[in-house]
Image (cartoon, grey):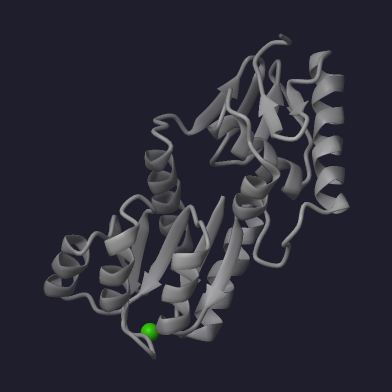
């Protein structure tokens, strides 16, 4: 899950990013409206956290521009302005939710979970595939009710596979959604994370639920075909 935070209070922006990374999300930071719009338009984010008072173009203008070409990526406005008029305007321009600063990080986490689940039309906080169960709140994976210990990267990969079951995921898509902007090719390190995740799943399940479709990508399946 790849999140962009556009917020010019650098300290706040960095601490949100850090908190989200601890939760297993990939987080990019941006401190300026123009740069933020550019990133929104060129990268494929799963969620955007947007401040309203920004240098360059302000948040409402950014949202307006962004929604002309993208109506599906959820946008959560984070702003110190508590006035009802700004909320109404933000929501009218296509924001999906609104959080007034200061806020508790836990509330932000809950809203992010709700917005990203909504995007994937998931109603449960628990994602499953056969015997694999993943709790999006505690970020714990269980197989046959036994906890499977995964690294942060392996967890992010598994979550993405669970949200996109029975569909081949290309390496490019994985880079966009699971790795942050720092990686631009399907490097060996990515293969290493996938192969260690597959190894752990295989040893817990007795088979490897992730298959490699040569030249296309990887797919998570409930049973061996
Ligand atoms: Ca601001």
Left or right: 191 as drawn, with respect to 134: right
User: In the image, residue 111 lies at what x, y percent?
Assistant: 39, 52
Of the pair 160 and 85, the residue shown nearer to us: 160
Left or right: 68 as drawn, with respect to 205: left
Q: Residue at x 33, y 60 (%)?
A: 69
Numbered circles on residues, count = 0
- Above/below status of 71 relative to 125: below
Q: Residue at x 87, y 44 (%)?
A: 192
- Above/below status of 29 relative to 188: below
Q: Residue at x 75, y 42 (%)?
A: 154
Q: Quadrant of residue 185?
A: bottom right
- Above/below status of 204 relative to 108: above
Q: Quadrant of residue 216?
A: top right
User: In the image, residue 116 lies at what x, y percent?
Assistant: 44, 46
Which residue is at the far front?
215
User: In the image, residue 106 lies at what x, y percent?
Assistant: 47, 56
User: In the image, residue 202 lies at what x, y percent?
Assistant: 83, 21
Q: Quadrant of the C terminus?
A: top right
Of the pair 57 and 148, the residue shown nearer to us: 57
Left or right: 91 as drawn, with respect to 179: left
Q: Residue at x 43, y 50 (%)?
A: 110
Of the pair 121 and 107, the residue shown nearer to us: 121
Left or right: 135 as drawn, with respect to 110: right
Of the pair 145 and 130, the residue shown nearer to us: 130
- Indicate the quadrant of ligand 1 in the picture: bottom left
């Amino acid at each position: 899950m790849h999140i962009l935070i556009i917020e010019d209070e650098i300290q706040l922006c960095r601490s949100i990013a850090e908190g989200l990374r601890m939760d297993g999300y990939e987080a990019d930071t941006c401190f300026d409206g123009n740069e933020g719009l550019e990133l929104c338009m060129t990268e494929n984010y799963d969620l955007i956290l947007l401040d309203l008072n920004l240098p360059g173009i302000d948040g409402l203008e950014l949202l307006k521009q962004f929604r002309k070409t993208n109506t599906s990526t959820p946008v959560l406005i984070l702003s110190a302005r508590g006035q009802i008029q700004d909320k109404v305007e933000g929501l009218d321009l296509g924001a999906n939710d609104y959080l007034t600063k200061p806020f508790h990080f836990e509330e932000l986490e809950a809203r992010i979970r709700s917005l990203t689940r909504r995007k994937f039309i998931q109603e449960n906080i628990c994602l499953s595939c056969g015997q694999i169960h993943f709790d999006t709140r505690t970020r714990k994976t269980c197989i046959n009710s036994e906890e499977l210990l995964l690294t942060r990267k392996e967890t992010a990969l598994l979550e993405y596979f669970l949200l996109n079951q029975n569909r081949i995921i290309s390496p490019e898509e994985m880079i966009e959604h699971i790795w942050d902007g720092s990686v631009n090719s399907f490097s060996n390190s990515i293969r290493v994370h996938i192969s260690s995740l597959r190894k752990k799943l295989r040893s817990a399940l007795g088979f490897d639920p992730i298959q490699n479709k040569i030249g296309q990508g990887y797919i998570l399946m409930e049973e061996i075909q």
